[in-house]
Amino acid sequence: MKKVAVINYGIGNIGSIINMCKKIDVETIEVQNADDLKQAERIILPGVGSFDHGMSKLHELGLDEAIKKAVLVDKKPLLGICLGMQLLGNKSEEGRWSGLGLIDFHCKKFKFDNDLELKIPHMGWDVVEFNKDDDVLLSDIKNQQRYYFVHSYYAVCEKEENCLMTCDYEKKFVAVVKKNNIYGVQFHPEKSHQFGMKLLKNFVEKV
């Protein structure tokens, strides 16, 4: 059984992620310090809330540098979820802290014309499209998948090659980022039923 570290840095409830991992027969380790991170083969960085709070908590626990070492030196696969995805980038309009800088993107806040009557946050089930279809994360997954979103900020990639999936909310935005062994999903796979279960299974078994 593969061991997956789920990072618990006080930003959101990680119970639903752990429960989803149990359903796909994956052993999870709840990680709150750098030493615990060494035990796992793969890493999940979840999170809800504000960008600066997330980065400050990772820094306070010494997990920011530990994550960088784990994925860049030890080459462990990493999956960021929601805020966890946004923290993989360089910066966000939401805060002043620098992100982990693992993938070249920045986050912007949704802004709409009043005529569109679109609400912020972008919340609920939505369809994604594949920007690429040959990545191992997407193995045996057909295009036009549906996932559950809750977010007010979205990623803007510096390089098109780092955009794996897109979603449309008045305009197209990046739903999944990828660089080498590092992935980030803006949606919540742990709340996306069979769609999210398959994606998590691919991350654990194929990445």
Image (cartoon, rainbow, N blue to C red):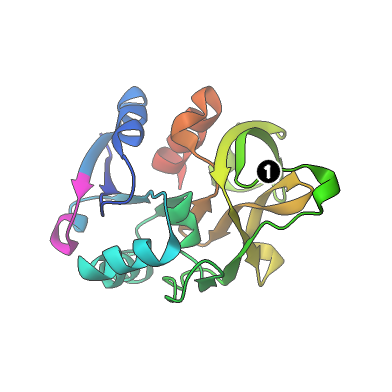
Marks counted in the figure total 1
Relative to 133, 14 lies left or right? left
| Direction right: furthest residue | 115
> 151 or 148, which is in the foreground?
151
Relative to 121, 39 lies left or right? left
Residue denoted by label 1? 119
Relative to 178, 171 lies left or right? right
Relative to 4, 121 lies left or right? right
Residue 33: in magenta span: yes
Residue in the image at 66% along x and 47% along y: 134
Q: Is residue 116 visible?
A: yes
Residue in the image at 46% along x and 59% along y: 182
| Direction left: furthest residue | 35
What range is drawn magenta here?
A: 30-36
Residue 85, placed above or below residue 159: above
Q: Can residue 142 be seen in this view?
A: no
Residue 151, placed above or below residue 2: below
> 47 or 132, which is in the foreground?
47
The image shows residue 174 at horizontal and vertical percentages of 66, 54
Q: How crowded is mark 1: few (under 14 residues within 10 Å), some or many (20 or more)?
A: few
Residue 105: in magenta span: no
Residue in the image at 35% along x and 63% along y: 53
Which element type, helix, strand or loop, lies under badge 1?
loop
The image shows residue 110 at horizontal and vertical percentages of 67, 56
Q: In which quarter of the image is the N terminus?
A: top left
Q: Identity of the amino acid at label 1?
A: Lys
The image shows residue 21 at horizontal and vertical percentages of 34, 31
Residue 144 location, quadrant:
top right
The image shows residue 124 at horizontal and vertical percentages of 60, 33
Residue 207, placed above or below residue 18: below
Residue in the image at 20% along x and 43% along y: 29
